[in-house]
Amino acid sequence: MAQAQAELGVIPQDAADEITRKAKLELLDIDAIHQGLAVTGHPLVPLVWELDRVCEGDAGGYAHWGATTQNITQTGDILLLRKAHDIFLGQLATLLRILADLAEKSKDMLLPGRTHGQHAVPATYGYKVAVWIDELCRHVERLQGCEGRVFVAMLGGGAGTLASLGETGLPTQDKIGEKLGLGSMSMPSRTSDDHRAEYVTLLSMLAATSSKIGREVYEQMKQEFSEVEEPVPAGTVGSSTMPQKRNPKLSQDIVAAAAQVRNFVPLALEAMQTEHEADRTHTVMMGRAVTETCALMGDILTRLINLFSGIRLFPERMRQNLDLSGGLIMAEALMLDLGQTIGRQHAHDAVYDAAQATATEGGTFREHLAAHPDVSSRLSMERVEALLDPAQYTGMCRPFAERGAKQAREVADAIEQRQR
């Protein structure tokens, strides 16, 4: 701030140079600052006192010229938030590369696609991963898209009116932003914190996706599924009393942390409702929301990286689960093929009758299909057997997985290029 003000003639250049030389933590008496904090209960004044003391001549008298505490602390918090932001993007790049490899590896691993908790149509594990990749890439886009709004310097003075600096205020704020690698608030009002509320909300959306992924791993790791297993390093103890336990710790921690992140969104929105031209309640609440969501988000992404770096897939069990219904999962394929001769709705009714009879009366799906006149008169049993092959009814699962892998690597490359 002193450098920017000197360039615009607000304070003497010599004063700005001296402030710059002495504005280093190792030159300040930290104990004196702590004592001042205890006495004043103010987060900045003791620091300004100490900076004034160490500056030679009258330079210290120009420190913090025309600014108010929130201008300094909020801009400082934004600098910290940007550091966290860069870490998140780096973590997402790492995660996307891991998921790209996983999508390619599992693009042909058949498993039952499930809707409403029930078998729907066949899918592949690679398709699941491609869905996650697609959503994570949109979160990268959202995080990058908010940068111009979120990472901005603030210099509005006591009530945001710039009365202390006048027409030089906004140019000074612009120069501060340039020197710090930030943008500049168009209205440096102390009541405007929608940009940080936006960032908390974006993190909560990323956390929700992370939780969805964690829940899927948690579900598929149950013995009743046994389709995947998150890393369980040698020596890991799942229970103090049940020696056999191999618990999904990473995925459960992801779900739990993500729930906490989402719960900070109401606090951030509440913090936007500042009274008049400034309100301490706003800064306390927003500071807590931002700090906690960032800490939790870094933890979530670290655990996702660890989880998918060592995840085990069991394609044989996936296929066994796919065959649990005895071919019922292929009812749609049968309906559409039969519908070419008797119409889609009549075919639906015929296959429905056979499927429901299988579920309620016993016998196999094949037997009930063979017994239905609308089916047996139009489809040979050889054709029925061919239509019951789930490997022939995975739609675009393989291309989706391949495209997802390519997309993940491209987005990761772009992130890393920006951060070089």
Image (cartoon, rainbow, N blue to C red):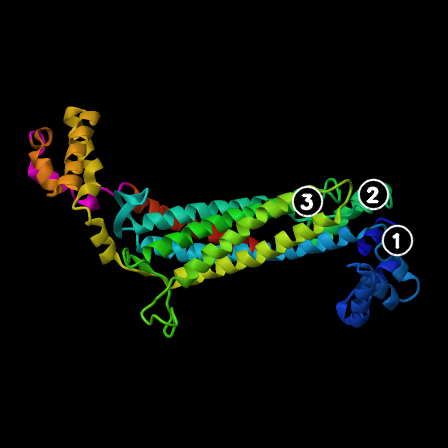
Three-letter residue code for mark 1: Ile
Question: Label 2 belongs to which residue?
Answer: 162
Q: Where the N terminus falls, by quadrant?
A: bottom right
Kindly indicate the quadrant of the structure image that contains residue 134. Answer: top left
Question: Label 1 belongs to which residue?
Answer: 11
Mark yes or no: residue 65 visible: yes
For label 2, count other residues whose C-alpha is less than 10 Å away and answer few (under 14), some (14-19) or many (20+). Answer: some
For discs 2 and 3, the disc positioned in front in the rendered view: 3
Image x and y of residue 76, in percent: 71, 56
The magenta-colored residue range is 377-395
> Would you say residue 370 sits in the magenta stretch?
no
Looking at the rendered structure, the number of numbered marks drawn on it comes to 3
Say which element carries label 3. Answer: loop
Image x and y of residue 121, in percent: 25, 42
Q: Give the residue at x 72% y 52%.
A: 74
Image x and y of residue 309, in percent: 40, 62
Question: Label 3 belongs to which residue?
Answer: 193
Say which element carries label 1. Answer: loop
